[in-house]
Amino acid sequence: MDKIKVIITNKQKDIKVPTGLRMLIRRCCNAVLQMEEFPGSVEVSVTLVNNEQIRELNSKYRKKDTDTDVLSFPMGENGKYDIDPNTGAKMLGDIVISMEKAVEQAERFGHSLQREVGYLTAHSMLHLLGYDHEDNGLQRLRMREKEEKVMTLLGLPSSSSYVITDEDE
């Protein structure tokens, strides 16, 4: 596999980032790219924020004035990506994860913070690669299957199956 550069920035102070979480984020990015057989070197940016920061981004870029768990900002479209002139790597885009929301959801779903952040990373990586789930149909199901496959590969399988409700959006 080609080189994968994952730049992780912590812009929040509300939640202590556990030891090993940055490595887990990198492993998730790698696992998604391997699963998808994505060719070439890539760069991905992951920023950890709090609920207020992600709400501001969600309001500014999606016109939704509410906090959310993760935002994806793809830099490519239809398999075409900007290239970093210094490295030749495809710039996939940016992932923004609310650590506060990740803690809340880990507690709600009864699993670890590591699993929740891993899941959010895998979910967002799939968005950066062009997957979508807005139609609530087959695409959503395929995306969920891929997310769970990555979690199982990383040793973080779901502790139970859960039904997606409107409040999980």
Image (tube, rainbow, N blue to C red):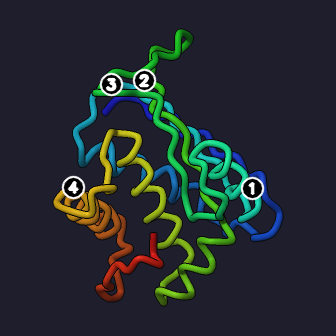
Mark 3: few, some, or many residues within 10 Å (few <14, many ≥20)?
A: few
N-terminal-most mark, 3 or 2:
3
Q: Position of residue 40 (x, y in %)?
A: 33, 25
N-terminal-most mark, 4 or 3:
3
Which amino acid type is marked by label 4?
Gln
Helix, strand or loop status at disc 3: loop
Label 1 belongs to which residue?
Answer: 53
Depth-wise, is mark 3 or mark 1 nearer the camera?
1
Q: Give the alpha-carbon distance from disc 4 to disc 3, as whole Å.
A: 25 Å
Label 2 belongs to which residue?
Answer: 90
Residue, x 65% and y 63% (percent of image)? 66
Which amino acid type is marked by label 3?
Gly
Q: Give the alpha-carbon distance from disc 3 to disc 1, as whole Å.
A: 32 Å
- Relative vertical location of residue 65 with respect to residue 16 in this rendering, above or below: above
N-terminal-most mark, 2 or 1:
1
Helix, strand or loop status at disc 1: helix
Q: Which disc, if any, is residue 139? A: 4
Of residues 165 and 141, the one drawn nearer to the viewer in this rendering: 165
N-terminal-most mark, 4 or 1:
1
Q: Position of residue 75 (x, y in %)?
A: 47, 29
Which image quarter holds the N terminus?
top left
Residue, x 33% and y 21% (percent of image)? 80
Residue, x 20% and y 59% (percent of image)? 142
Q: Which disc, if any, is residue 40? A: 3
Left or right: 7, with 1 as reference point: right
Left or right: 95, with 89 as reference point: right
Q: Give the alpha-carbon distance from disc 4 to disc 2, as whole Å.
A: 24 Å
Left or right: 165, with 66 as reference point: left
Depth-wise, is mark 4 or mark 2 nearer the camera?
4
